[in-house]
């Protein structure tokens, strides 16, 4: 058996140089957008959850334009584009669900459960659909429309539409981010007051 000889450095140098030029995924965005709740619940000692007191907040469903991690821009009645460089840290539906759950807990003092934990303490169940969450280029307003469905433990169901708008300063990531956060918090507060009454 012949001994294995190491390859000369010149033979493997092109492979090393080529490896630095290959990208196996999309370029990482410079920054990501997220939603921050205006109201948060304080730290506490925890509590035993009484039957029917908890509320489970389900991830909202959303149309295809909101399933992406990009911010949609509507122009006219039939045109849709996305803001260049505006990328969400997660899907808008997931970000809004988390903000909504925190806002409900802070404003109502009800314990809020993750959808996977509903069976632990069945009570109110909040689901919904995000109909709109983006920029209207014609008015330069960010708009959110959320259709909520509240199901009670006894099977009763109530529905209600919540909306909010806020001005955007530009069709850029920095120009819409504050307005997106504002309208999400406004809708979350409206929903929290509705379920907490």
Image: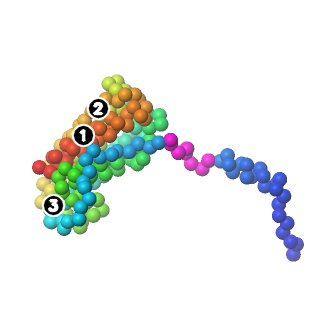
Q: Are marks 1 and 2 in contact (CB under 8 Å)?
A: yes
Residue 186 has which mark?
Answer: 1
Residue located at (29% from left, 46% from top)? 37
Judge whether 44 appears above or below 197 on screen: below
Q: Is residue 25 magenta?
A: yes
Q: Is residue 26 magenta?
A: yes
Q: Are marks 1 and 3 in contact (CB under 8 Å)?
A: no
The local crowd at label 3, few if under 14, some if 14 to 19, many if 20 or more residues have their Cα within 10 Å, is some
Earlier along the polypeptide chain: callout 1 or callout 3? 3
Q: Quadrant of the N terminus?
A: bottom right
Q: Quadrant of residue 35?
A: top left
Earlier along the polypeptide chain: callout 1 or callout 2? 2
The local crowd at label 2, few if under 14, some if 14 to 19, many if 20 or more residues have their Cα within 10 Å, is some
179 with respect to 27 (left or right): left
Earlier along the polypeptide chain: callout 3 or callout 2? 3
Residue 17 visible in the shown view: yes
Element marked by disc 3: loop
Residue 166 has which mark?
Answer: 2
The local crowd at label 1, few if under 14, some if 14 to 19, many if 20 or more residues have their Cα within 10 Å, is many
Which of the colour schemes (rainbow, by chain, secondary structure, one colour) is used?
rainbow
Residue located at (86% from left, 71% from top)? 3
Residue 53 has which mark?
Answer: 3
Residue 129 visible in the shown view: no
Residue located at (26% from left, 51% from top)? 40
171 with respect to 160 (left or right): right
Residue interval drawn in magenta:
23-30
In the rendering, at what x and y percent does residue 160 appear?
Answer: 18, 43
Mark pair 1, 3: CA separation? 24 Å
Mark pair 3, 2: CA separation? 33 Å
Q: Quick one: 108 or 140, which is closer to the camera?
A: 108
196 with respect to 103 (left or right): left
């Amino acid at each position: 058996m012949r001994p294995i000889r190491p390859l000369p450095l010149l033979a493997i140098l092109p492979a090393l140089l080529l490896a630095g030029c290959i990208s196996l995924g999309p370029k990482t965005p410079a920054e990501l957008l997220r939603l921050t709740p205006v109201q948060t619940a304080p730290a506490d000692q925890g509590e035993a959850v009484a039957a029917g007191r908890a509320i489970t907040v389900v991830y909202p469903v959303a149309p295809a334009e909101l399933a992406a991690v990009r911010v949609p821009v509507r122009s006219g009645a039939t045109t849709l584009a996305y803001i260049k460089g505006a990328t969400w840290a997660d899907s808008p539906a997931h970000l809004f669900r988390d903000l909504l759950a925190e806002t409900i807990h802070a404003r109502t003092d009800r314990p809020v459960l993750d959808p996977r934990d509903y069976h632990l303490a069945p009570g109110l169940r909040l689901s919904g659909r995000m109909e709109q969450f983006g920029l209207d280029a014609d008015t330069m307003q960010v708009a959110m429309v959320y259709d909520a469905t509240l199901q009670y433990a006894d099977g009763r169901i109530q529905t209600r539409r919540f909306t909010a708008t806020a001005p955007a300063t530009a069709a850029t990531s920095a120009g819409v981010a504050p307005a997106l956060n504002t309208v999400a918090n406004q809708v979350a507060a409206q929903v929290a007051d509705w379920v907490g009454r």
